Image (tube, helix red, strand yellow):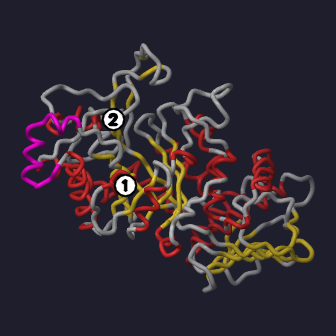
Amino acid sequence: MDQFPLLPLPSNVIDGSGSFVFPSDVTVSCDEPLTSEAELLIERLGAVLPRPAGVVNAAQATTIQLKHRPQGGGREAYQLNVTPAGITLTAAGPAGIFYGCQTLAQLIEQTAQQPGEIRLPAVTIDDEPRFGWRGLMLDVARHFFTADEVCRFIERMARYKLNTFHWHLTDDQGWRFPVKRYPRLTEVGSKRPYTLIGHNESRPRHYDDQPYWGHYTPEDIRRVVEFAAKRHITVVPEIDMPGHMQAAIAAYPELGNLPCAVGVRPHWGISQHILNPKPATIDFMKNVLDELIDLFPGPFIHIGGDEALTHEWGESRTAQDRMIELGLKNEHELQGWFIRQMGDHIASRGRRMIGWDEIGENELSPGTAIMSWRGTQAGADAAAKGHDVVMSPHTHVYFDHHHRGPEGEPLAIGGMTTLEKVYSFEPIPDNLDPAHHRHILGAQGNVWTEYVPSESHLHYMAFPRAIALAEVLWTKRAARRWEDFAGRVSMHEKLR
């Protein structure tokens, strides 16, 4: 199987004897729970098979059989058997079948590039992932991407067995999530009057003269969530708070701390405007979370919690009185209190809160998970305390950095994260006691979009680095070799 650049690398591949030659009419049979997976496989193969495939009754003799059978391994494990007589894919559930279909589709697509008949060598592949959280984040607040563009991004994720889509929906530069109870969040908060030209660190700053806007409807959200679910991808929505809230304060000034007008931020960086800690603001954000939870069925709700500048709380009589009332020592503890109000509310709705690693600097609500972005030590510390962790360090998996360096590449936020550096990433820190390894759920890459204005640019920044991360999260550490991966990803890119 060395001639096939499978990505990510399967757990176990055993070459068989002979090969399977595809007939002129390809058919797929499936057990009843697997109809959706069969249809998606057929849709993907329609571009490479000589004649369209079709789904037939499971009792009939078919080219490809998808079978739902109890077996070893978890729900994402599968076994693929290619023999001269046909192809059988077996798994304990639909997710395993779906991932097996991605492997099979890669085999067929690569064989179809060669002249003549489509022939697969006999092989048995037993496969399952190393980590359960294999994610990619898309920021749509700085630059907006339509529901169709988001679905195409998710489709590409699914091909490499990534299973978590983190959707960063709000920030200082734009509010994209529809809230029926508070319509001004999108009527006002989704629109900035103009946008920075060039890099945020350049001086003097220059701006275009084009208003920029965009937000989703509830129907858009449902369509994306359904599209992802069919591909066994869980959507984790993020409403960042109490900082990164300038767009919300522009829409509802009563959420702010100071008696001054605030507009939607037209340039990048961190705004010092932060939500006030009044009871009415706490209730406001709980109401927003309720509408978020109603649209997103996944187990996790992301509340951000990062880069919350508390200068305004230090200048606000209301915030200072609130600290005294709650018996808090400083603004840092006030932020922790704010986050716990959200965590407790999310838990009351049967979900789990997750936030960036700053939230771990204070006491957390039970069940809260940490997303470690300022390196991996904060994640290791949280895991040692019994919190679940998703590793997402800016040093290795921030895909808004340059691929190779600024020369010859599009404008980017800075830094350099090469493909090899992504592939070298290890989600479990060496200094973490093995007793706590189970708390490392996995990892994800992040695409922040301050400097990513288009869909083509988005895919350029995310791939192939996301493929390297996919293999880090799927394939056992001992089986990974950079030189081998570099050869496979190179072959794969030539076939696209």
Was residue 414 drawn as part of the magenta stretch in this picture? no
Residue 486: x and y, percent?
Answer: 77, 50
Q: CA distance from mark 2 to mark 1?
A: 17 Å
Residue 174: x and y, percent?
Answer: 35, 35
User: Does 203 appear above or below 27?
Assistant: above
Q: Residue at x 41, y 46 (%)?
A: 168
Foreground residue among 254 and 495:
254
Q: Residues within 10 Å of mark 1 (few under 14, many from 20)?
A: many
The reply, left or right, for residue 193 in relation to residue 399 is left
Foreground residue among 114 and 436:
436
Q: Which mark is residue 246?
A: none
Three-letter amino acid code at disc 2?
Answer: Asp
- Examine the residues drawn in magenta and state their main secondary structure: helix
Which element carries disc 2, helix, strand or loop? loop
Three-letter amino acid code at disc 1?
Answer: Gly
User: Does 305 appear above or below 23?
Assistant: above
The reply, left or right, for residue 304 in relation to residue 4 is left
Q: Residue at x 51, y 45 (%)?
A: 394
- Residue bearing the label numbered 2: 172
The reply, left or right, for residue 439 in relation to residue 336 is right
Q: Which residues are magenta?
A: 311-329
Q: Residue at x 22, y 50 (%)?
A: 285
Residue 28: x and y, percent?
Answer: 71, 71
Q: Residues within 10 Å of mark 2 (few under 14, many from 20)?
A: many
Quadrant in which the N terminus is drawn:
bottom right
| Front: mark 2 or 1 | 1
The reply, left or right, for residue 381 in relation to residue 104 is left
Q: Is residue 90 visible?
A: yes
- Residue bearing the label numbered 1: 355
